[in-house]
C-alpha cells in the first residue's frame, strides 16, 4: 500500500521569500510517480509538478521545484519568490506505475504574508 | 494545458432527491476519469474509477447504488448521487489523466461541485 505524509498542517512565508513544503512517502513499488497540486479557496485542483521515481534530475516548473530524495523517500516542494497568490492548500500525491489510482496526502495550508 | 470542465459548481437539493454532476474533458479524450470526495479541510478520497464503455470500479466502502457513475463517451463522465441525504453533503471533484505514466504524467481536475443536501 502507498502512503503520503505531510507533517505541516500550516505554513507562513513572507512575500518574495522561498518556502519548502514537506512530503514523505512510503511504498514498496519500484516505479512510481510523485505529484504536487495546489488547491485555492475556490476548490479547483491545479497541477504543479511531477517527478518520476527513475528521473535522475529533480523536476522544475517555473517557480516550483521538487526536491526528490529517493533514499529518504521524500519529495519536498520548493516555491521560490513567494507571491500572495500562492496562498492555498498544497497536496502531495503519488501513483504506482501501471495503476490508475493517485493517493493524496493530508495537505499543507500555505499563507503568504505581505 | 488540458482542461476538465465540471458542472454544476454548486448545488443545493432536498433530502431524497437525486443530483447529477457532469465531468467533461474539453480538449482531450479521457478513457479513464476519477471521482473524488473531499470533506472540509481534509484530503481527497478516491470514490471510483470511471472507464469509458464499462462499469466503474468503486473503492471499498463506497456504495455503488448510491453513487452512480456513467462514462458514456471519451469526453464525458457523470456522477449521480441518488436519494441524497445530508451526510452526502460534500465537495465532489473529478479528474482525468493524460499521457502515459512514463512521460510527464499529469492528472487534471475539474473545478469541483459543492453539494449541500438540506
Image (tube, rainbow, N blue to C red):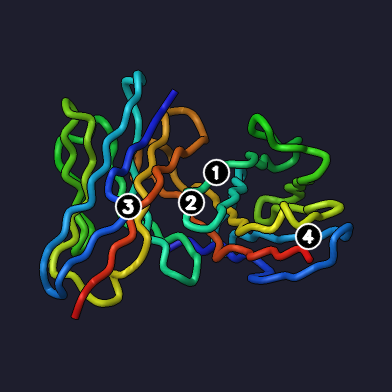
Give the residue at mark 3. Answer: A9
Q: Position of residue A64 (x, y in %)?
A: 21, 58
Camera-side mark, 3 or 4: 3
The image's mark for residue B45 is 1
Secondary structure category for the residue under label 3: loop
Crowd around label 1: few <14 · some 14–19 · many ≥20 (10 Å): some
Give the residue at mark 2. Answer: B42
> Residues under labels 2 and 4: Cα distance?
23 Å
Secondary structure category for the residue under label 4: strand
Q: Nearer the viewer, residue B25 or A101?
A: A101
Q: Does mark 1 fall on the same chain as mark 2? A: yes
Mark 2–mark 1 contact, CB under 8 Å? yes
> Residues under labels 1 and 3: Cα distance?
18 Å
Give the residue at mark 4. Answer: B20
Q: Does mark 3 fall on the same chain as mark 2? A: no
Res B65 → quadrant = top right
Secondary structure category for the residue under label 2: loop
Mark 2–mark 3 contact, CB under 8 Å? no
**Mark 1 chain:** B
Q: Is residue B86 above or below residue B61?
A: below
Secondary structure category for the residue under label 1: strand
Amino acid at each position: 500500500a502507498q502512503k503520503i505524509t505531510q507533517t505541516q498542517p500550516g505554513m507562513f512565508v513572507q512575500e518574495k521569500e522561498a518556502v519548502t513544503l514537506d512530503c514523505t512517502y512510503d511504498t514498496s513499488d519500484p516505479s512510481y510517480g510523485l505529484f504536487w497540486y495546489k488547491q485555492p479557496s475556490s476548490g479547483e485542483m491545479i497541477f504543479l509538478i511531477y517527478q518520476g521515481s527513475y528521473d535522475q534530475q529533480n523536476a522544475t516548473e517555473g517557480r516550483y521545484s521538487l526536491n526528490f530524495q529517493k533514499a529518504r523517500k521524500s519529495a519536498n516542494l520548493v516555491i521560490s519568490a513567494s507571491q500572495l497568490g500562492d496562498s492555498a492548500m498544497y497536496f502531495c500525491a503519488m501513483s504506482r506505475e501501471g495503476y490508475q489510482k493517485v493517493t493524496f496526502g493530508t495537505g499543507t495550508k500555505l499563507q503568504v504574508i505581505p | 494545458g488540458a482542461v476538465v470542465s465540471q458542472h454544476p459548481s454548486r448545488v443545493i437539493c432536498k433530502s431524497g432527491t437525486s443530483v447529477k454532476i457532469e465531468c467533461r474533458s474539453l480538449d482531450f479524450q479521457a478513457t479513464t476519469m476519477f471521482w473524488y470526495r473531499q470533506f472540509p479541510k481534509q484530503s481527497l478520497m478516491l470514490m471510483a474509477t470511471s472507464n469509458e464503455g464499462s462499469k466503474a470500479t468503486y473503492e471499498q466502502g463506497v456504495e455503488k447504488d448510491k453513487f452512480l457513475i456513467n462514462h458514456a463517451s471519451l469526453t464525458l463522465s457523470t456522477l449521480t448521487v441518488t436519494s441524497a441525504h445530508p451526510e452526502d453533503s460534500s465537495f465532489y471533484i473529478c479528474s482525468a489523466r493524460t499521457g502515459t505514466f512514463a512521460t510527464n504524467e499529469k492528472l487534471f481536475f475539474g473545478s469541483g461541485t459543492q453539494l449541500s443536501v438540506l
